[in-house]
Image: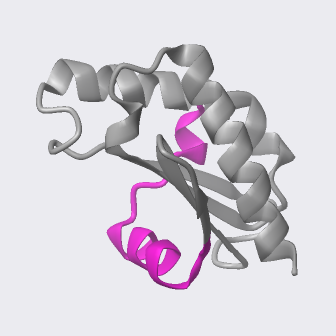
Amino acid sequence: MLSAQSRLRDPELFRKVFRFGERAGNRKLVVHVLTGEVSQNERLVGFVVPKKVFARAVARNKVKRQLRHICRDRVQTLPPRTVLVIRVLEGARGSDYHELEEAVDDALSRALARSAK
């Protein structure tokens, strides 16, 4: 599970990442990446799972748990001072863990490549 220190909870930082961060996505999710907004050697990860996509709280929480588990190992591979937000889309409905994992890896690699430019 993703550590509590790595969780993004600040609403202002969420807004900054959405507004100024690089993004990449696919049919299942969109990844937003912003570097340089947090303290040295800190990496934060946040999740957005809208009610419109998963109406039941049980389903939303299950997807968030899966994403936290997927990001647990990937958070240390992020560059220092990076904030990552994963926004789930309607295409993720009915996806299993491995499909979400592939979608995260695909979108994350493209977003990191864009932010490195």
Residue 39 occupies quadrant? bottom right
Q: From this viewpoint, is residue 1 visible?
A: no
Give the answer, above or below, for where 50 lies relative to 56.
below
> Seen from this angle, which residue lies furthest left?
55
Camera-nearest residue between 107 and 27: 27
Whole-percent x, y for residue 31 in the image: 57, 56
Q: Is residue 77 left or right of residue 90?
A: right
Residue at the image position 39 percent from the left and 76 percent from the top: 15
Q: Is residue 2 left or right of residue 93?
A: right
Q: From this viewpoint, is residue 57 visible?
A: yes
Whole-percent x, y for residue 115 in the image: 77, 74
Whole-percent x, y for residue 26 in the image: 56, 49
For the N terminus, the quadrant is top right
Camera-nearest residue between 82 and 30: 30
Magenta region includes residue 8: yes
Residue at the image position 27 percent from the left and 29 percent from the top: 60
**What's drawn in magenta, residue-wise?**
1-22
Residue at the image position 40 percent from the left and 33 percent from the top: 92
For the C terminus, the quadrant is bottom right
Residue at the image position 48 percent from the left and 15 percent from the top: 96
Q: Is residue 60 left or right of residue 23?
A: left
Whole-percent x, y for residue 100 in the image: 55, 28
Magenta region includes residue 76: no
Give the answer, above or below, for where 28 lies relative to 57.
below
Q: How many marks?
A: 0
